[in-house]
Amino acid sequence: MSFIFDLFLQAWPVMALIDLARYAIAASVMALLIFTVARLGFGPGRIQVRQPTGRDYLREIALSLRSVVIFSLNGFTIFALVTSGVIVLPRTVEAAGGWVGIAASLAAVLLAHDTYFYWTHRLMHWPKLARHLHRAHHRSSAPTPFAAYAFDIGEACIQSVFLTLFLLVLPVHPLVISLFLLIMIVRNVMGHAGVEFHPAIFAPGRLLGWTTTTTHHDLHHQTGRWNFGLYFTWWDRLMGTEHPDYAARFHEARSRRLPQPLDA
Ligand SMILES: [Zn+2]
Ligand SMILES: [Zn+2]
């Protein structure tokens, strides 16, 4: 027992710092990009007329910092499972099936996470669960990049435990875990950016229309009833939960350029 406690004291602060840095750097870089674009008066305008207030930023950051603690506790759980030999990760590229194996396992973890996210997200919209698990995230009706981890405690636990469950079923190379966490936070802050940076190739029906855009997730925050997916649009299409005007709203958001009036 004291071994686990010593391990916790050594490893958890490092994990908390890494989780904090991942969130703070990704959200700040995106916020800085949005601020610079608006300041210089070029590039895309806001998707919504509604503007986030200073209180929105503070609430999103406070909630996200709490989620960072929960995520790092889950990170320590994974670390302890690996250290104790319950989860055996492939340590070399060869053991992971070569670079093809690395690419395939990255695709697998993204597909699994998208599926897990879609269905847990839909479940959390069930009114009886929503008020306990998902209300905090939807207080951001005009989200900012800092809403990336703005979750209730229950939702933060549900979101973080995915990786533990996945690694128990399919242990992947540490590089795949790092890339997955990187892609997750980048797509997360992009989804909450409030301005549409995705080029037209991401429009529904176009070459990359199977991936989500900022408008896709922004519509979820605006309506609270459409577009539940995270990385991909497949589940929303399949289950009939894609916003009926998603394509039109995406093109509209893209055509809204600064310094035109924000609600033009
Ligand atoms: Zn969101
Ligand atoms: Zn939601």
Image: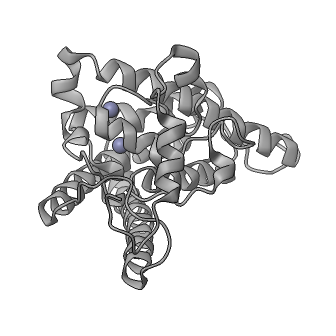
To which quarter of the image does residue 151 belong? top left
- Answer above or below: position of 187 versus 131: below
- Say left or right for 125 vs 11: left
Q: Residue furthest left?
A: 55
The percent coordinates of residue 89 (x first, y second) are 67, 41
| 202 left or right, relative to 102 | left
Tell me residue 131's x, y (percent). Answer: 15, 26
**For the C terminus, which image quadrant?**
bottom left
Q: Total marks drawn?
A: 0
Q: Quadrant of the N terminus?
A: top left
User: 181 or 81: nearer the eye?
Assistant: 181
In the image, is 53 to the left or to the right of 227?
Answer: left
Residue 119, position in %: x, y?
A: 45, 20
Q: What colour-coding does the image apply?
A: one colour
Quarter of the rendered image showing ligand 2: top left
Query: Is 259 rendered above or below residue 91?
Result: below
Q: Nearer the viewer, residue 175 or 106?
A: 106
The answer to whether one can see residue 61 in this image is yes
Hey, which quadrant is residue 20 in on the image? bottom left
Name which residue lies at 55% across and 32% down.
Answer: 114
Residue located farthest toward the bottom when viewing the structure as drawn:
40
Q: Is residue 204 left or right of residue 76?
A: right
Q: Residue at x 21, y 62 (%)?
A: 57
- The answer to whether residue 230 is visible is no
Query: Residue at position x 49%, y 32% from top?
Result: 229
Residue 13, position in %: x, y? 34, 62
Q: Nearer the viewer, residue 60 or 15?
A: 60
Residue at the location (43% across, 56% down)? 189
